[in-house]
Image (cartoon, grey):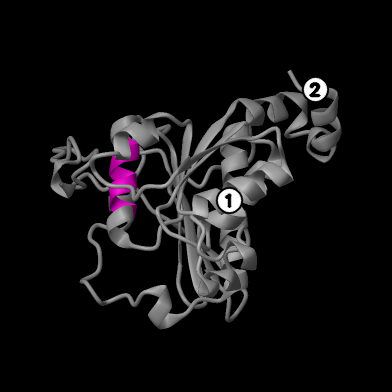
């Protein structure tokens, strides 16, 4: 049930035919876990809080540094030296006190992934390394949770939705992250953000797209990004969509799966 204050706050959503009162109520009842409160996680958290997602969780063990502020818009100069989850919690409460925020000031690993992910309806991965992305996607499959995952380059980014624990219209399981990227690139092949740089506004674009995809998944309108990878080229301001399918040889939900737990990450 939406209060009078919430009806006014979300009025521009409620008048949308594809959202309406039932859609806004679904957002209020939803719980979303965001991996990382950085370049992608910052706009994700702010837009999902503004949208009225009832429970937001953030996993991040980092502290705010001056170099973060070029793109991590949930944090401000006075927050330098604070834990990112604490800074995010304060900003979210200021933006929308109706949102319940859960701060997880830890690094996601094989020991805590299942318990953290298992407590939420939907997971959004804004991490900045391949090991965490594979861990999150494997854990979401094992926990039966949908995943929205995005990645940033210097002037490019990508976004997709993974529902590998569910079957598509053809009766086959949906593709996994491993169907899209079977193996991580060799160590050092992809330079870190601190070395290569990243366009700050691009993080805002991809983070906002992640938030929009989360809202679409929760409310249930539009065409899901399951099996589709959206790629953004900021140099040319070009958007392209690549379709990908389940690989029967993938080790997670393939014909002969070999990953049944997270022991490989221990």
Q: Are marks 2 and 1 in contact (CB under 8 Å)?
A: no
Question: Which of label 2 and label 1 is nearer to you?
Answer: 1
Q: What residue lies at 65% left-to-right and 45% top-to-bottom? A: 92
Name the side, left or right, on which 162 lies relative to 157.
left
Answer with left or right where residue 10 lies relative to residue 166.
Answer: right
Magenta region includes residue 153:
no
Percent x, y of residue 160: 47, 52
Q: Residue at x 51, y 55 (%)?
A: 84
Residue 179 visible in the current orientation: no
Where residue 169 appears, as percent x and y from the top left, is 43, 32
Between 234 and 168, the one lying in front of the other is: 234
Picture mark count: 2
Q: Which residues are magenta?
A: 133-141
Q: Nearer the viewer, residue 59 or 198?
A: 59
Measuring 28% from the left and 43% from the top, which residue is drawn there?
138
The residue shown at (39%, 81%) is 195
For the residues marked 2 and 1, what is the alpha-carbon distance in whole angstroms?
A: 25 Å
Compared with 45, 165 (above or below) is above
Q: Which residue is mark 1?
A: 88
Q: Is residue 262 above or below residue 21?
A: below
In x, y percent, where is residue 252?
A: 22, 41
Q: Which sits earlier in the primary sequence, circle 2 or circle 1? A: 2
Q: Is residue 29 above or below residue 9?
A: above
Q: Which residue is mark 2?
A: 3
Say the numbered circle drawn on residue 185: none
Give the image location of residue 2, x and y in percent: 76, 22
Residue 72 appears anywhere in the view: yes
Give the crowd class for mark 1: few <14, some 14-19, many >=20 residues within 10 Å: many
Q: Main secondary structure of the magenta part?
A: helix
Q: Determine the secondary structure under disc 1.
A: helix
Quadrant position of residue 207: bottom right
- Left or right: residue 241 versus residue 52 is left
């Amino acid at each position: 049930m939406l209060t009078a204050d919430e009806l006014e706050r979300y009025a521009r959503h409620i008048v949308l035919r594809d959202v309406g009162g039932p859609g806004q109520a679904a957002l209020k009842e939803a719980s979303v876990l965001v991996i990382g409160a950085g370049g992608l996680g910052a706009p994700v958290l702010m837009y999902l809080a503004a949208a009225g997602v009832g429970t937001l969780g953030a996993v991040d063990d980092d502290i705010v540094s001056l170099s973060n502020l070029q793109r991590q818009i949930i944090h401000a100069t006075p927050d330098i030296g604070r834990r990112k989850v604490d800074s995010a919690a304060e900003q979210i409460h200021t933006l929308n006190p109706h949102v319940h925020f859960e701060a997880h000031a830890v690094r996601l690993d094989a020991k805590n992934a299942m318990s953290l992910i298992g407590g939420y309806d939907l997971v959004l991965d804004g991490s900045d390394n391949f090991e965490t992305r594979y861990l999150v996607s494997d854990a979401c499959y094992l926990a039966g949770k949908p995943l929205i995952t995005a990645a940033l380059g210097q002037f490019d980014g990508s976004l997709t939705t993974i529902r590998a624990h569910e079957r598509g219209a053809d009766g086959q399981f949906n593709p996994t992250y491993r169907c899209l990227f079977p193996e991580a690139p060799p160590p050092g092949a992809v330079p870190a953000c601190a070395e290569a740089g990243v366009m700050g506004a691009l993080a805002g674009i991809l983070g906002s797209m992640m938030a929009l995809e989360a809202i679409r998944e929760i409310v249930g309108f539009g065409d899901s990004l399951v099996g589709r990878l959206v790629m953004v080229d900021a140099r040319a301001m070009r958007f392209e969509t690549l379709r990908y399918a389940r690989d029967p040889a993938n080790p997670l939900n393939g014909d002969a799966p070999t990953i049944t737990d997270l022991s490989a990450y221990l």
